[in-house]
Image (cartoon, helix red, strand yellow):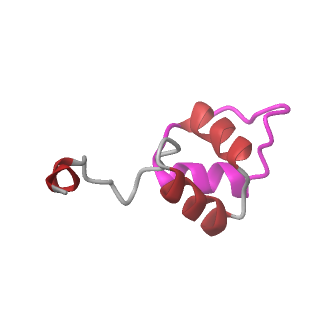
Amino acid sequence: MSFLSHRPVEQPDRINLHNPQAAAAWEQKLHADREQLRRAIAAVGDKASKVEKYLQDGATGDGDKPH
């Protein structure tokens, strides 16, 4: 199983929705579903602190706040 050692390293401050286990962990941590995370990432990027703030501010994709 040497292929496992060649996987890209996950960045703990970035949300990666392409990794099912990482995405599920972020869903649980941020109390958001996958679609909410997708919208947040589209709006502010994949940095966890920005996504968390976006979700806490109540942004739902309807009338997003300017940044």
Which sits in the foreground, 23 or 7? 7
The quarter of the picture where residue 27 lies is bottom right
Please check the rendered image and state whether residue 57 is part of the magenta-colored stretch, yes or no: yes
The answer to whether 60 appears left or right of 48 in the picture is right
Q: In which quarter of the image is the N terminus?
A: bottom left
* Residue 67 placement (x, y as % from top left): 61, 35
User: Residue at the spot x=65%, y=46% of the render?
Assistant: 37
Point out the stretch of residues depicted in magenta: 45-67
* Residue 14 placement (x, y as % from top left): 42, 50
The answer to whether 26 appears left or right of 39 in the picture is left
User: Residue at the spot x=61%, y=68% of the render?
Assistant: 29
* Residue 31 placement (x, y as % from top left): 71, 64
Residue projecting furthest to the bottom: 29
The quarter of the picture where residue 35 lies is top right
Residue projecting furthest to the right: 62
- Residue 35 lies, with reference to residue 57, above or below; the image says above
User: Residue at the spot x=64%, y=38% of the render?
Assistant: 38
- Residue 67 lies, with reference to residue 15, above or below; the image says above
* Residue 65 placement (x, y as % from top left): 73, 36
Residue projecting furthest to the front: 1
Please check the rendered image and state whether residue 60 is part of the magenta-colored stretch, yes or no: yes
Which sits in the foreground, 48 or 2? 2
Please tell me how many numbered marks the rendered image carries.
0
Q: Is the magenta stretch mostly helix, strand or loop?
A: loop
User: Residue at the spot x=53%, y=51% of the render?
Assistant: 20
